[in-house]
Amino acid sequence: MDGVIGTAGVVAILLGLGTVIGIVQPSAISWRWMIAAAALVVLNDVLLTSGYRTLPDFVGGDWNWQGKLLALFATLAVAALPTIGWRASGLTLRQAPGSLKAALMVSLVYGAFFLTLALVFPNETASAETIAFQLTMPGLEEEAFYRGVLLLVLGRAFTARLSLLGVEWHWGAVLSCILFGLAHALSVSDGVFAFDTLTMALTGVPSVIGVWLVLRTRSVLLPVLMHNFGNAIMLLI
């Protein structure tokens, strides 16, 4: 039940913020795509939790391999729809012409930051499964969803654009970062919400960088690599 309440809370925040933006800029919002984004958030949460723990765990292991795989397959299926599209969602290896130089520089800074954290705050030795999971699933599933399909749908929900730092920003980009932060920082226990400000900052800020990379390169490739590097380097040093 806590999982259902948590999902409802995140969706309420999304729709609430969308409503505020719609009031301020009524001509710049498409509610059809906004509702589609909310539905995607629900679908992602349901599959990540294996139907809120109602499905047997056929994969096993100490980590949520099954939930991540189910959510990833659903994201890929949604991206395959004619109204969405793999390339439009950034689920492509092809980088936008002229984007790679700046994107690689930003990625190197991102990687250096997490490398520094790993050196300053070393972790205990991790199991092979933990390393394998962190090298693959978080980046593949979360980037494909939050910086891929969800970013595209939210971008269609909000038509206003602002050119900044070499990319076209929109309210959907901001909301995708907020949703990513909430996925990590917002929890529910016995029907009571808890919010971790530090976790929100540590996930929300890298999310902004990931969004910039996708808007710049039109691909989730670098965000996936950087995400998994950031997760795994702490375990390898």
Image (cartoon, rainbow, N blue to C red):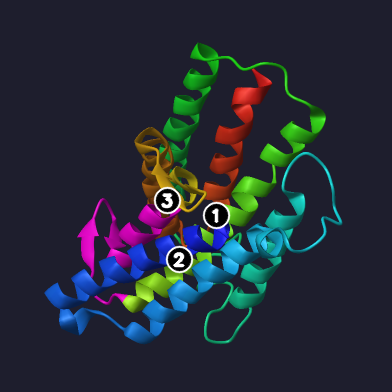
* Mark carried by residue 182: 3
Residue 99 in view in this figure:
no
- For residue 55, what is the image quadrant? bottom right
Q: Name the element at disc 1.
A: helix
Q: Which mark is residue 8?
A: 2
Q: Would residue 185 be found to the left or right of residue 123 on screen?
A: left
Residue drawn at 36 percent across, 54 percent down: 178
Mark 3 vs 1, N-terminal side: 1
- Please say if 195 is above or below 164: above
Q: Is 198 located above or below residue 55 in the figure? A: above
Q: Which segment did they paint magenta?
A: 158-181
Percent x, y of residue 69: 73, 58
Is residue 231 something one can see in this rendering? yes
Q: Indicate yes or no whether the magenta region holds residue 37.
A: no
Which amino acid type is shown beneath numbered disc 1?
A: Glu
> Type of residue at label 3?
Leu
